[in-house]
Image (spheres, rainbow, N blue to C red):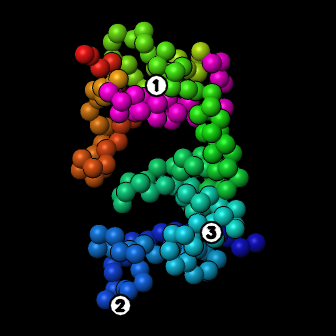
Amino acid sequence: MRKHTITALWEEVPDDADDLVVVRGGFRVYLCLCGRPLSDRASAELHASETGQCTTCLGTTVEDIVPGFSQPCTACAGTGRRRAQLTWELAHVEAESVITVEIVRGLIAGFTEPFRLSEVADLVRETLHLPVGRLPVGPRVRDILRGLEARGELVLISAPDELLRGTSVMLYRDPYWEHATG
């Protein structure tokens, strides 16, 4: 059995790089342990899909968010496998249908003090009687809270936990929100 794990490496741009996608002074080279040549991200994802690997992390189990910062792959729950990725994608779709904006808006209406993402996610899980690990409750609730923030209903009051790339990429682990006034 051949091993299929695709790695993406940043390389310097050679002088004859006419057909490469250049990104800020560098380009990505995709290499699979099986030796198959992969010219770009699309061919790497196709090869990953054909070989049963996650198309997000390409079978490595790790997502590279920005150079120098990575985390376990959220698309396949850190397994590197396509089947787990598809299962998790279906769980995200189910979470979107079960955890609605109206439910979250109703649950946070009673909060008079700032509240954390984790508090709202736990309240949603408890209210809907969802077992832990069944659906991605936290990510769904985060997306809804960010949407309410974008609509001006909530204000994010947390400072970021990490600045990954200055102020353009920030990491919040368990942010606080409060209701917008006026």
Q: Secondary structure at mark 3?
A: helix
Q: Is residue 25 left or right of residue 77?
A: left
Identify residue type, mark 2.
Answer: Asp
Residue visible at 59% across and 15% down in the picture? 127
Question: Which residue matches tag 2?
Answer: 16
Q: Nearer the viewer, residue 36 or 24?
A: 24
Mark 2 closeness class: few <14, some 14–19, many ≥20 residues within 10 Å: few
Q: Which residues are magenta?
A: 128-152
Q: Is residue 129 magenta?
A: yes
Measured from the top left, where is residue 112 in percent x and y? 35, 9
Task: Give the numbered dot on residue 118.
Answer: 1
Q: Is residue 59 magenta?
A: no
Measured from the top left, where is residue 30 in percent x and y? 51, 73
The answer to whether residue 3 is visible is yes
Q: Secondary structure at mark 2?
A: loop
Q: Quadrant of the N terminus?
A: bottom right
Residue visible at 35% across and 75% down in the picture? 22
